[in-house]
Image (cartoon, rainbow, N blue to C red):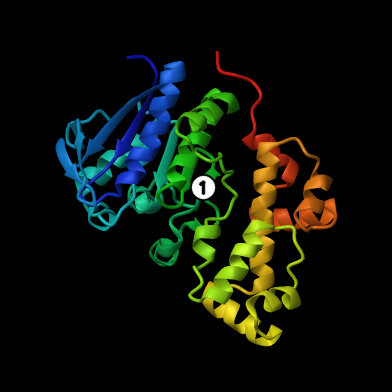
Amino acid sequence: MAGRRVVFVIYEGFESLDLVGPHEVFQHASGLTGGYRCEIVAPAAGVVAAGSGLLLHAAAGAATADAAGVDTLVVAGGGGVDAARHDPTLVGWVAAAGAGARRVTSVCSGVFLLAAAGLITGRRVITHWARAAQLRREHPELRVDCDPIFIRDGHVWTSAGVTAGMDLALALVEDDLGRDVAHAVAQELVMFLRRPGSQSQFSVPLWSRQPRTDPIRAVVAAIHANPGGGHGIESLAGRAGLSPRHFQRRFTAEVGVPPAAYVERVRVEAAQRALTAGDDPVETIARRYGFGTAETLRRTFHRHTRVAPSDYRNRFRSTREIA
C-alpha cells in the first residue's frame, strides 16, 4: 500500500483517544489523498486494553515489528505509560524506530516513553499539564513547557492531553499535505477549528466553573448572551442583587476567576468565533465585543491565544476546495 508509514505505539492502560483521535485524522487525510498507511504496534500483537477498558487490536508486537521505514512515530499516552517505559523490548523498539523516523511524536504522557528511549534529549516538549511537574522532575534534560497544546522542536512534535492529539495530527497533515487538506479533514471530523500549537491548554472548559447559585448563574448567562455589553462591576452586581464588594467575592469564589477576567475571556471567545465565521474587519469586531479599539483587541487576543487576530483568521479559514 502506498503512502507514508505512520506507526502508533500503544500498551496496556493507554489513553484510547490518544490513539483513536490522531488515527482518524490520518485516515481521513489518506481518504482524500492516499497519503498515509497507519499501523499499530504494542508490546505484543493482539488485543490491548485501554485505561478505560476499551479493547483495541495491535497487528504487530515490538519483538517482531519492523522498526525500519517509519515515517511518523506516534506514541500514545495514558496511565500505563509508567509501566510501558520500563519494558525493555518496547523501549528498544521505540528507540530503533524513532532513530530512523522522519518525525517522532507523542500525545500527552507518551512523551515519557520517548524520553525513556532517548529520542528527545535536550528538546522542548509538552505533556498534559497535570504531568508537567513529574516530567520536569524525572527528566531534567528536557525543556518542558506546560502551556501550549503542542510543540514542534525540529523533527520532534509533542502534544498535551487527549483532544490535543487531534490538533497535533492535523498540524502534521498540514505540514505534509497543506492547509486545505487539513481544513477538509477538520470539517469531515466536525472539529470546531484547527488550533495553533501555541494556543494554551487552559481553554474555557478548564478555567471556569459552573456557578452554584442563581444570582451568579444569571450574571454568567447575561455575559454570554451579550459579550460586548456594559459588564462593569456595578452593572453585574446590580443584576445579581448584591453590593459590588460582595458580588466580587461571590463571583470569584463560585466561578474561580474574578468577574473582569471572566468577561475578558468570554469576549475573546466571541472574537474568535467572529474571526472564523465572517469577514468583518478587526475594528468592527473590537467594537461589537466590548474591546473598544482594534489595538485593544489585538493586545488582549494575543495575550490569551498567543496569535494575532489576523493570523488566527488566516489559519482557521480556507477558501479553496480539495479536488
Whether 207 is drawn above or below 5: the answer is below
Q: Quadrant of the C terminus?
A: top right
Q: How many marks do you count on the picture?
A: 1
**Residue at 74% across, 74% down:** 235
Determine crowd level at label 1: few under 14, some 14-19, many 20+ residues with C-alpha closer than 10 A.
Answer: many
Give the SS element for disc 1.
strand
Q: Quadrant of the N terminus?
A: top left
Quarter of the image holding residue 65? top left
* Residue drawn where x is 39% and y is 66% of the image: 134
Q: Mark 1 belongs to which amino acid?
A: Phe
Taking the spot 63% from the left edge, 36% from the top edge, the residue there is 316
Looking at the image, is 258 positioned above or below residue 90? below
Q: What percent of the width, then of the height, locates residue 281?
A: 81, 40
The reply to whether residue 145 is in sight is no
The residue beneath circle 1 is: 150
Q: Front-most of 240 and 175?
A: 240
* Quarter of the image where one finds residue 154: top right
Instruction: Answer left or right for 224 relative to 74.
Output: right
Vertical placement of residue 210 versus 185, above or below = below
Name the residue nearer the viewer: 315 or 58.
315
Q: In this rendering, does residue 153 appear at all?
A: yes
Residue 23 in percent (x, y) is at 36, 34
Q: Is residue 217 above or below residue 98?
A: below
The answer to which of 201 and 64 lies nearer the viewer is: 201
Residue appearing at x 53%, y 47% in the figure: 151
Quarter of the figure with residue 291: bottom right
Residue 119, image x and y in percent? 40, 45
Q: Nearer the viewer, residue 55 or 253?
A: 253
Residue 114 in the image, given as x and y percentages of width and height? 36, 48
Left or right: 323 in relation to 8: right
